[in-house]
Image: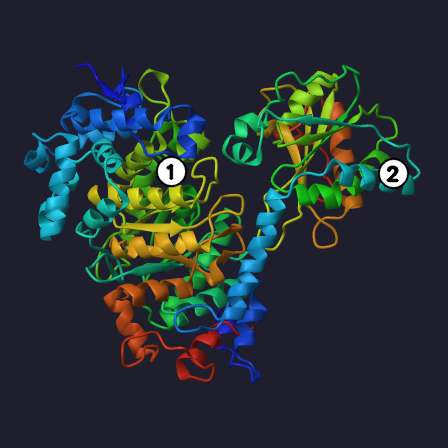
Amino acid sequence: MRRRRTVGGHTHEFPTLVELMAKATPARSGDVLAGCAAESAAERVAAQTVLADLPLATFLDEQVVGYDEDDVTRLVLDTHERAAFSPIASLTVGEFRDRLLAWAAAGDEAAISGLARGLTPEMVAATAKLMRNADLVAVGRRTRVVTGLRSTLGLAGRLASRLQPNHPTDDPLGVTAAIVDGLLSGCGDAVIGVNPATDSPARTIALLELVDEIIDRYAIPTQSCVLAHVTTTLRALEAGAPVDLVFQSVAGTQEANRGFGVTLDLLAEARAGALELGRGTVGSNVTYFETGQGSALSADAHRGVGGRPVDQQTLEARAYAVARHFAPLLVNTVVGFIGPEYLYDGKQVIRAGLEDHFCGKLLGLPMGVDVCYTNHAEVDGDDTDSLMLLLGAAGATFLIAVPGADDVMLHYQSLSFSDVLTARSVLGLRPAPEFEAWLARMDLLDDAGRVRELSADAPAARALLAAASA
Amino acid sequence: MSSALDRPLPADPDPWAVLRGATRARVALGRAGDALPTARELEFRAAHAAARDAVHQPLDPGVVRAALDSALGAAQLPGAELVEVHSAAPDRATYLQRPDLGRQLAPGTALPRVGADLAVVIADGLSPRAVHEHAAGLTTALLQRLPGWAVAPLVLAHQARVALGDAVAAALGARAVVVLVGERPGLSSADSLGVYLTWDPRPGRVDSERNCVSNVRPPHGLGYAQAADTVAALLGAARSLGASGVVLKDEGPALPGS
């Protein structure tokens, strides 16, 4: 089939699927850096027009990254479920977009959510490329993915948060102070998740025990995670540490995952170890993954069929296939973390955050977002506010929040605890149900169900502040 | 932690001070409704503004030259020639989006092939402000510690990444290069200078072949003397070994400040 289209009197041709996908991608700096972006606005629309006419089934026969050389591609195709694909098997990418929007408008969550195992990352990535931001929101909010361990995540009308209490030296009191601050602000229902300053097993175990003790002492219906490398978490499991969640950063190619030092077998082994502990009360999802557009490119592991550079949005969606295989409790893209050479400004960050949420949800993931930026990107708090509210409207499973929007260990800006309160109150969203009940038990909610502004001598504040007293 | 958990809350006049005293993180900020109070919001904006301005402030060769003359004079070292080069990134916006261009010299750049033991490249990187404030002091401290080394004319590089030093040193014919580069500004540190040392520099060297000393930023970060001691020791070890990078770290002597 010849893939070409004339726009504005000029004929654009796209010889390979890799090039077609890349050139159909809305503009972003990472694709320019990789050398695969459309060279003009007209070429981009021509590619989108060709992509719209492409049958979805094409992606089952023609690969972006080769089957023989990449275990992510093999995982995707070997676990593809024809029965789940059958309702949309005859559609083109453009028709699929239309169908999704019709289902979303009709509120038919079952029709959308039932497709997950029949979809490949490339199918959803292609569809996202044809969607505007509002399309991504409209379909995202009607894609239901519910997971649980000690809190239930992804229910309609809920917005959870990861409380990220990082400290530059993993100081126990410093971490505890940030946890207490977040809990008093109604955050932490998705996970209390610490990025350790070093990857030592001893440090990881100490942090696991610290957070576990706080959760246990105050009977908080949530889970902990220390975001160490999976091999470190395996060591912690062997040592009998209280591991709720196995964490790992993953990417969309085998080579990029090798750069992260992970294989699918290693992830399976760690998940089995955590499952064996049986630490769940309302569910048994025991893995947590982070991803982000540009991670494959930054590892120089972004090439596909014919050695051609694959666009970063397609590679990102492929990372979700890796995550999906391990039945995660949580997955989030870290959008804006690795810098302006991948996502240059607020417009690109907002677009990428919505794409990632849409693609992850459609593939069946409990998708959250770290809405963030570095100081050399053209992004500020207004942009993160916009993306936060759009993601709340899109039904994101959770958002990441740090004290005062400033991560003093990783040196970047994310959302603050109060931002989460704002998103919930503006959009009428509530915390995870078990966590909301805990907030009420701790007398942290007022009669309207809103997280109180505490005075320090309130009983709940006194109880939690005791944890942070040296 | 159990000991901390078991202790009673101290009778502090401001119990929130417990949180604030435990971490540099922005805890216990208070609220205005569901948002931050005005004062806390403006504090955050001020920190972000300082970091943004540090990234976008143009590198001013006059400032660097004057600071160098003054610092070298104070150390009773001879004045140094300062050669300016530009990377292939023509402006800041391109520089930020195309790290590859920031690693190449602008087309047509001509440098004298002087041959030297060491090239010193002062690069704006992501914080020209760090270069304005700390490059002269650190360069002087370093030169004081390298009396036996033939040092090529100092190079001041605009829109430059660390690896631009490889191209500069190769053109100059230097056996090693030290790149002083403005580091990515954080909210609490907009003026931090990093130092990267590469033995036998040429285009294509990778990061694992370099040694780094970061956060040079007196009085809050590393001081010039301490940083220069470390870099000079690393240079000596690299010369003995004929290599830099991971291999040097693994086999070299224990280094102060590293």
Separation (CA) of disc 1 from disc 2 = 46 Å
Residue A357, compared with residue B169, is above or below; it is below
| Protein chain holding label 2 | B
Amino acid at dot 2: Leu
The dot on residue B72 is: 2
Judge the density around disc 1: few (<14), some (14-19), many (≥20) Cα neighbours within 10 Å: many
The dot on residue A195 is: none
- The percent coordinates of residue A231 (x first, y second) are 41, 42
> Looking at the image, which residue is at 65% across and 23% down?
B166
Judge the density around disc 2: few (<14), some (14-19), many (≥20) Cα neighbours within 10 Å: many
Residue B26, compared with residue A84, is above or below; it is below
Front residue (pair B167, A73): B167
Going by the picture, which residue comes out furthest to the front?
A9
What residue is disc 1 on?
A293
- The percent coordinates of residue A446 (x first, y second) are 31, 80
Front residue (pair A232, B180): B180
- The percent coordinates of residue B15 (x first, y second) are 53, 79
Give left or right: position of A112 versus B228.
left
Amino acid at dot 1: Gln
- Label 1 SS: loop
- Label 2 SS: helix
For residue A307, what is the image quadrant?
top left
Residue A258 seen in the figure = no
